[in-house]
Image: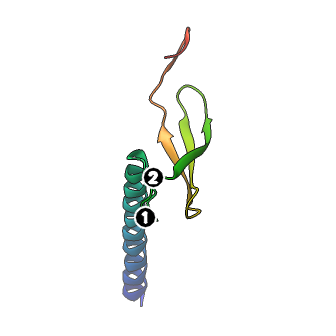
Amino acid sequence: MDFYLLAFLLIILSGSVLVYIYYLKEKKEELASIERGYCPRCHKDTIELVDQRSGGCSGPKLLSYECTACGYYNSFAIENGGSCGSGGCR
């Protein structure tokens, strides 16, 4: 009985990891399309940056994009890449 429970949990865990990897791959492809200037859903050049927030010098930057043609909306957390020092952000 314990073997079947362990096998079931292992299957659920590996399935969850695979789904999350697929989600991240899709998100990466959408961001690549947006960086080229096209909406990932309708493939028109009507994508706009509607919100940009930052957690400071070293925190992630949150970018929100919206397509004016089809209504696509998505947010992305991008690593800021800057560093804090005594002189402020670099």
Tell me the tag on residue 45: 2
Residue pictured at 43% horizontal, 58% vertical: 27
Q: Nearer the viewer, residue 25 or 5?
A: 25
Helix, strand or loop at label 1? It is helix
Q: Nearer the viewer, residue 76 or 1?
A: 76
Q: Tell me the kind of residue under disc 1.
A: Tyr
Q: Nearer the viewer, residue 25 or 31?
A: 31
Identify the residue under disc 1. 23
Counting from the top left corner in percent of width and height, residue 81 is at 44, 29
Which mark's residue is nearer the viewer, 2 or 1? 2
In the figure, 46 relative to 10: above or below?
Answer: above
Residue pictured at 43% horizontal, 60% vertical: 40
Label 2 Cα neighbours within 10 Å, binned few <14 / some 14-19 / many ≥20: some
Counting from the top left corner in percent of width and height, residue 44 is at 44, 58
**Image-quadrant location for residue 30:** bottom left
Q: Tell me the kind of residue under disc 2.
A: Asp
Counting from the top left corner in percent of width and height, residue 66 is at 57, 54
